[in-house]
């Protein structure tokens, strides 16, 4: 298993929860996306600057295994590492409830890069990803 290279703490807000009082399943994707963006920022990579250069990383597929529900006020940490598989940059992202670090979700986010509208590569992402 790879080691996480980035983590971001988050707190569940009450309006993100559904009638059952648990975090709505769609909100997990927001958490995952926010964590990926913060990871890039932490590595001095600007999504906006990439776009201005005609480079657009986009999600191609997300697989999420839901394990333990999060509830309003829960704190959690989203951890990630990224590998390169051919043309894909694969973000493995897991969210743990705090303080007990019980797994909430396990996810795999396949990302591809469009360069001027065509599949391509991004040297900035290449530098972040390990080959698997």
Image: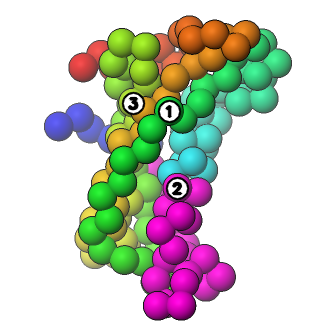
Tag of residue 90: 3
Mark nearer the N terminus (2 vs 3) = 2
Frontmost residue, 49 versus 42 = 49
Q: Give residue 107's position: percent from left, percent from top.
A: 35, 49
Q: In this view, does 70 lie to the left or right of 113?
A: left
Q: In which quarter of the image is the N terminus?
A: top left
Residue shown at 54% from the left, 41% from the top? 36
State the SS at label 3: strand
State the SS at label 1: strand
Tag of residue 60: 1
Mark nearer the N terminus (1 vs 3) = 1
Above or below: residue 6 compared with residue 69: above
Q: Is residue 132 left or right of residue 60?
A: left
Residue 121 shows in this picture:
yes
Tag of residue 29: 2
How many labels sit on residues?
3
Residue shown at 56% from the left, 9% from the top? 120
Residue shown at 49% from the left, 77% from the top? 23
- Other-residue count near label 2 (Cα within 10 Å), few / some / many at <14 / 14–19 / ≥20: some
Q: How far apart are marks 2 and 3 (CA)?
A: 15 Å
Q: Give residue 65's position: percent from left, percent from top.
A: 30, 58
- Other-residue count near label 1 (Cα within 10 Å), few / some / many at <14 / 14–19 / ≥20: few
Above or below: residue 100 compared with residue 128: below
- Other-residue count near label 3 (Cα within 10 Å), few / some / many at <14 / 14–19 / ≥20: many
The stretch of residues the image draws in magenta is: 7-31
Q: Name the quadrant containing residue 18.
A: bottom right
Frontmost of labels 1 and 3 is: 1
Frontmost residue, 126 versus 44 = 126
Mark nearer the N terminus (1 vs 2) = 2
């Amino acid at each position: 298993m790879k080691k996480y290279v980035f983590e971001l703490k988050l707190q569940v807000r009450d309006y993100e929860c559904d009638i059952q009082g648990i975090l709505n399943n769609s909100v997990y994707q927001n958490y995952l996306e926010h964590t990926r963006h913060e990871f890039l920022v932490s590595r001095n990579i600007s999504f906006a600057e990439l776009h201005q250069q005609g480079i657009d990383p986009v999600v191609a597929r997300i697989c999420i295994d839901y394990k333990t529900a999060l509830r309003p006020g829960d704190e959690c940490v989203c951890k990630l590492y990224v590998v390169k598989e051919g043309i894909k940059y694969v973000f493995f992202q897991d969210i743990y409830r705090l303080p007990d670090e019980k797994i909430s979700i396990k996810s795999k986010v396949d990302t591809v890069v469009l360069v001027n509208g065509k599949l391509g590569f991004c040297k900035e992402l290449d530098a972040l990803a390990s080959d698997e």
